[in-house]
Image (spheres, rainbow, N blue to C red):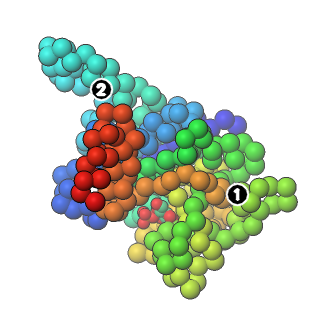
Amino acid sequence: MTITKAVIPAAGMGTRFLPATKSMPKEMLPIIDKPVLQYVVEEAAASGIEDILIVTGRGKRAVEDHFDFNPELEAFLKDNGKTDLIEQVQGIGDQCRVFYIRQKKQLGLGDAIRLAREHVGREPFAVLLGDTIIDPPAGSPPGLRQLLDAYEKKHASVVAVHRVPRPWVSRYGIVDGRPDAGDSENLVRLRRLVEKPKPADAPSELAIAGRYVFTPEIFDCIDHTGRGVGGEIQLTDAMNLLAQQQPMYALAWQAKRYDIGDRVEYAKCFIDFALRRADTGAAVREHLKTIL
Ligand code: G1P
C-alpha cells in the first residue's frame, strides 16, 4: 500500500529555546530565511506524501498562518515590484494538503501521535518530528523517502536511527536488534526499544532520529502505554509494544540530523546551510575564516 499521509507533531513547548519561544513556535525558527517546519514539509512532499496533519497546540498559530494564503502580503509585494518573492510565499502551502489538530495537554509525543488516529484511519503512515531537519548526503533520496522504500520492501513499521556516542544515549530513544538474513547491516529487525536509557543500560548506540513509518496498530499500542520517562506517554514505549506484536525495523542511515530544539545543533545547522547557499556561502565562509 502506497503511503500518502504523514503526521508532524509540533506541539512541544520549546522550553530549551526560551525566550524566543515565548511567542513563537520553535518549529518556526528560521534557518536563514526558511522556518524549520517548512524544511520538514518539503521533505515530506519530496518523498511522495500528499496529506499532512500537523499537531499543534497553544501559541502555535504562526504555523497555520505560514502555510495559509496571505493576500495582503502578496498585494504589498506586487505593488513594490517584488514578483520573485510572490512565487515563494504562494507556493508554501501548496505542496501537500495540510490539516491541523491541537493537543490540549502536553502529555508527550505518544499522545500527540494518538490524536492523528481518525485522520489517518486504518492506513500505514509516516511521522516527521517538526523540530528536526534531516540532511542526506548530496545525491541521496530525501530522508523520509529512504524510510518509505524500506517500508515497501518489508511491509512493516520502520524507524530511522543514527549512531551516537554512548554518553549521549540518554537524550534519545535507543533501539536493539539485528539484521534479518539477506538484509544489509543498515536494516535492523527490532527486538526492543528504550526511551532515554542511562548509558550503562542502553542496549546499543543506535538512536531514533525523528522519522518513522508506522502500521496503524501503533494506535492500539499507544492506548496501552502508560506514562514513561518524564511522566509523558512516550512513542518509543508504544513502539516497544508494537515490536512484540509484529515485525518492525530500524534503518541506520548516513543523513545528518539537526535537532533544532537544541541550541548548539541549531547554530550548527544555520552555519552549515549558510555555507552551502549560493547567496550567503562565500561571505559567511570569509567571515568565519576571519574570526577563527
Ligand atoms: C524524541 C523521541 C526520542 C527520539 C528524539 C529524536 O525525544 O522521544 O525517542 O530519539 O525525539 O529527536 P525528544 O527530543 O522530544 O526529547
Mark 2: few/some/many CA within 10 Å (<14, 14-19, 20+): some
Mark 1: few/some/many CA within 10 Å (<14, 14-19, 20+): some
> In the rendered image, which residue does mark 1 sit on?
186
In the image, residue 190 above or below residue 278: below
Residue shown at 40% from the left, 41% from the top: 276
Q: Secondary structure at mark 2?
A: helix
Side of 213 relative to 270 (left or right): right
Question: Front-most of 148 and 247?
Answer: 148
Residue 66 visible in the current orientation: yes
Choose mark 1 or mark 2, whichever is in front. Answer: 1
Q: What amino acid type should be assigned to the residue bearing mark 1?
A: Asn
Query: Is ligand 1 less than 8 Å from the beta carbon at label 2?
Result: no
Question: Front-most of 141 and 100?
Answer: 141
Q: Position of residue 105 (x, y in %)?
A: 33, 61
Question: Front-most of 76 and 221?
Answer: 76
The N terminus lies in which quarter of the figure? Answer: top right
Q: Position of residue 7 (x, y in %)?
A: 48, 45
